[in-house]
Each structure stands twice: as structure tokens, then as C-alpha cells.
Image (cartoon, rainbow, N blue to C red):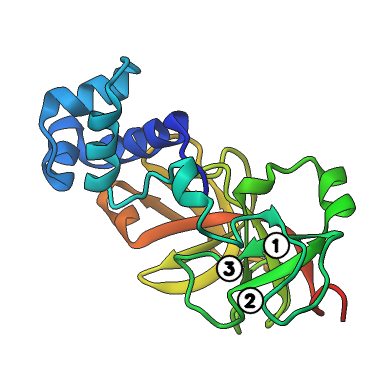
């Protein structure tokens, strides 16, 4: 997760429970049923218990102190590693779960980002794969991702991993445990995934902007 959010963690748990059932999902991630039930029901928990849950789910709990050590965690930066003055830009990190096909970070104009209304700490970027299923996205394009949500709440263009392969397409989730994946061709059959079949899908973030050149070039 780009930034820890308990609501996001519960959304991930709801998704897992919808696929495998409460006991099945607790067993899958190695947690006791009472802990999973407490998370599902929104009960207050000690930070140590939250950390145990995030570790079991394979997520990271990024504390503020740890984030300070990352110079490219969507922060304003006065100088990039190449020595270029970037005082008017925001550094955005490459998505840590996506196959690395570009530099570790790029810079976006800070005033432009501020006007978009996105949570800056939730922004990551990727390079679009060779084959994309979303009409506005072209192969090799820079894609800025909003990672504030773990799963889509409405029909939108998302980057995601399908059995480890990076893809971009239209995702929608009518309810937890159900995902619809469609492409640019209206005649193309929509994939309807439910239950454990969704374990091969890892949403990375909603595509909010694409470009063909690095900012400043």
C-alpha cells in the first residue's frame, strides 16, 4: 500500500472473505478466525495486531519514520539523483509491485498535480505493457496510477497483474468477490471472475493520466 489506510485493509479483507469465506480466508493468510472477524466488523485493534494482519496479507505498514528514508515517496524534491533542479516538481515512485521497465522515479509539475485533486502519497507510475485493453492507453506510455483504493469501486481503467503479467484494462467490481474485466472492443467477451479465481489478479491502481514523454523532456 502506498500509504496505510485501515479502511483499505478492511476492503482487502472483505474481498478475501467473499472469495474464500471467513474461516477459509483466515486459514489462507494464517490468522485466527477471531482476528479476521474483528477486522471485518471494524472493531478497534492494537497497532501490534494491525501489523500482524498486514504482514499475514503480504502488505506493508509504512510508518511515517520509514517513509522519510525514501526520497521518492511522492514528495517535493529540490534535486533529483542526476543533479537536475526539480524544486517545482513532485517525485513519484515506480509502482513497487509492477515489473520494472523504467527508472525508479519521475518528476511531475507540482502545480499541475495539485490541481488534479489526487492524494499525492497514493500516486505511483508504470510503463504500459505491449498489449493494453483500454483505448486511451498506448504501448510504452507513462501511466500515472491512483492507488488510493485496493479494488475498483466503479467501471474504470486500471493497471493490474494477471498471474504476474502486467495488464491494463477496464475493471469493475459489482460486489466483493466478483470482478469484471473488459477491453476496448465492445464485441470482446467480458471476463467474469469470482471466488478463488480472483487470486491470480492483483490490482495496482486506477490509470488517471497517460503520456508519451517524460515530464520536462
Task: Reply above or below: 47 against 118.
Answer: above
Residue 171 percent coordinates (x, y): 56, 53
- In percent of the image, x 30 and y 42: which residue is there? 54
Residue 186 shows up from this direction: no
Identify which residue, 108 or 150, lies in the foreground. 108
Label 1: which residue?
91
Label 2: which residue?
127
Residue 35 percent coordinates (x, y): 18, 26
Task: Reply above or below: 35 against 179.
Answer: above
- In percent of the image, x 72 and y 77: which residue is there? 141
Residue 170 percent coordinates (x, y): 61, 57
Residue neighbourhood size for the residue with mark 1, other residues' Cα within 10 Å, grouped as few (<14), some (14–19), many (≥20): many
Judged left or right of residue 162, residue 166 is: right
The mark lying in front, picked from 2 and 3, is 3
Residue 163 percent coordinates (x, y): 35, 70
Residue neighbourhood size for the residue with mark 3, other residues' Cα within 10 Å, grouped as few (<14), some (14–19), many (≥20): many
The mark lying in front, picked from 2 and 1, is 1
Task: Work out how far the residue at label 2 is from the one at label 1, CA to CA, in angstroms.
Answer: 16 Å
Amino acid at each position: 500500500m502506498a500509504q496505510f489506510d485501515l479502511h483499505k485493509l478492511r476492503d482487502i479483507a472483505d474481498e478475501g472473505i467473499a472469495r474464500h469465506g471467513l474461516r477459509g480466508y483466515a486459514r489462507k493468510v494464517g490468522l485466527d478466525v477471531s482476528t479476521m472477524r474483528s477486522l471485518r466488523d471494524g472493531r478497534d485493534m492494537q497497532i501490534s495486531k494491525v501489523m500482524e494482519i498486514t504482514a499475514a496479507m503480504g502488505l506493508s505498514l509504512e510508518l511515517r519514520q520509514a517513509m522519510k528514508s525514501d526520497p521518492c515517496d511522492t514528495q517535493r524534491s529540490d534535486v533529483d539523483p542526476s543533479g537536475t533542479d526539480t524544486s517545482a516538481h513532485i517525485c513519484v515512485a515506480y509502482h513497487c509491485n509492477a515489473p520494472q521497465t523504467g527508472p525508479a522515479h519521475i518528476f511531475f509539475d507540482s502545480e499541475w498535480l495539485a490541481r488534479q485533486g489526487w492524494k499525492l502519497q497514493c500516486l505511483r507510475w508504470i510503463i504500459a505493457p505491449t498489449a493494453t485493453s483500454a483505448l486511451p492507453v498506448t504501448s510504452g506510455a507513462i501511466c500515472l496510477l491512483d492507488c488510493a483504493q485496493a479494488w475498483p469501486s466503479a467501471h474504470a481503467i486500471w493497471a493490474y497483474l494477471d498471474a504476474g503479467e502486467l495488464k491494463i484494462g477496464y475493471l469493475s467490481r459489482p460486489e466483493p468477490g466478483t470482478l469484471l474485466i473488459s477491453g476496448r472492443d465492445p464485441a470482446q467477451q467480458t471476463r467474469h471472475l469470482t471466488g478463488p479465481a480472483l487470486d491470480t489478479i492483483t490490482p495496482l491502481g486506477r490509470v488517471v493520466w497517460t503520456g508519451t514523454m517524460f515530464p520536462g523532456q
